[in-house]
Image: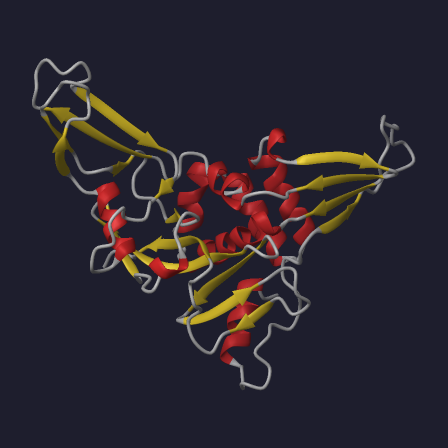
Amino acid sequence: MKTLFEEIKASIKNNYNQDRSFWRPVLPWGGVFTIKAGRKAVSCTPLYVEIRLKNTCTIDGFLMLLYVILNENENFPRELSLHFGREFVDCFLYLMDTYSFTTVKLLWIWDKMEKQQYKSEVHKASLIIDLFGNEHDNFTKNLENLMSTIQESYCSNWRCPTRIQEDQQRTININPPQEIPHGNLIRLAVDELFCSKIELCEERGCGGLREFSQRVFCHGAPPFVVLNMQHWKSEDLAYVPYYLDLSDHKYLLEGATLFNKEEHHYSAAFQIDGHWMHYDGLRNVNLILLNKPPEFLLLSSLVYIRATEK
């Protein structure tokens, strides 16, 4: 039996331009999980017999990307097991490959999210879980310490009250440059966050120079990184780099999540063997092979995978 990933790759290979869509819906928006209670089941209060999921686009695109990433490199499942747990990774892949899409969403919700991150209520005989919100809150912030980085800095003034500082971040938030310089803005913003530099110390009355070391990953270079792009304007995204150098490691563009402000809806794009696909769980035909790379004008995030060392 072929895995879902193998099915998608086969559909790309056998495409003849007439039909560029995958043969069945993948990770459709929402979901209903029916609870099968046996005769000896004990009633609970309040009683519900099904779980309904709403507004799941805040995790759907990233779950699709995570599935593709786990299949891109034979070592990635083992590496990500160190962060997510082996049981989670194995269960996630099994549920995706058996098309158990509602269950895989519940796996993420119950295993990785905090209860205060979503709304839930019992309506008649259904437990309704509503994931309306921000995908970075619902997904990126729940990646354990996968992307944790640290940067140390030292002030040249021995009397500086905070001479030695450490800046630790769990996610990678890059901000648009204050002044628009020439060149690749995204790469410049990444370098600003990761590269070593010397600046005037901002401590009041100090006057010293603060030297920042290179920012490094706390737990080694992760298999993939997510760049939070939600504060960038479309005019600043004319060029998206296909590779980045992060802490002495090369990362290649794997995909992106896109945000439609009018619909308050997230979708995703990713590439397999150099072919770009667009995923939108809200559409009936929700996985489509693209003729060319997508336009990254509605970016919410960029996803890069670590290049294989040769």
Residue 1 vs residue 272: left or right?
right
Residue 45 position, x and y percent, is 85, 26
Residue 88 position, x and y percent, is 55, 41
**Who's the residue at 84% across and 36% down the image?**
48
Q: With respect to residue 46, does 53 lie above or below? A: below
Question: What's the coloring here?
Answer: secondary structure
**Who's the residue at 76% across and 34% down the image?**
121
Residue 121 vs residue 182: left or right?
right
Q: Quadrant of the N terminus?
A: bottom right
Q: With respect to residue 153, does 251 lie above or below? A: below
Pick whichever, 15 or 191, lies toward us. Answer: 191
Q: Which quadrant of the structure image shows residue 218? A: top left
Pick whichever, 20 or 116, lies toward us. Answer: 116
**Who's the residue at 43% across and 62% down the image?**
297
Residue 92 position, x and y percent, is 57, 48
Residue 58 vs residue 160: left or right?
right
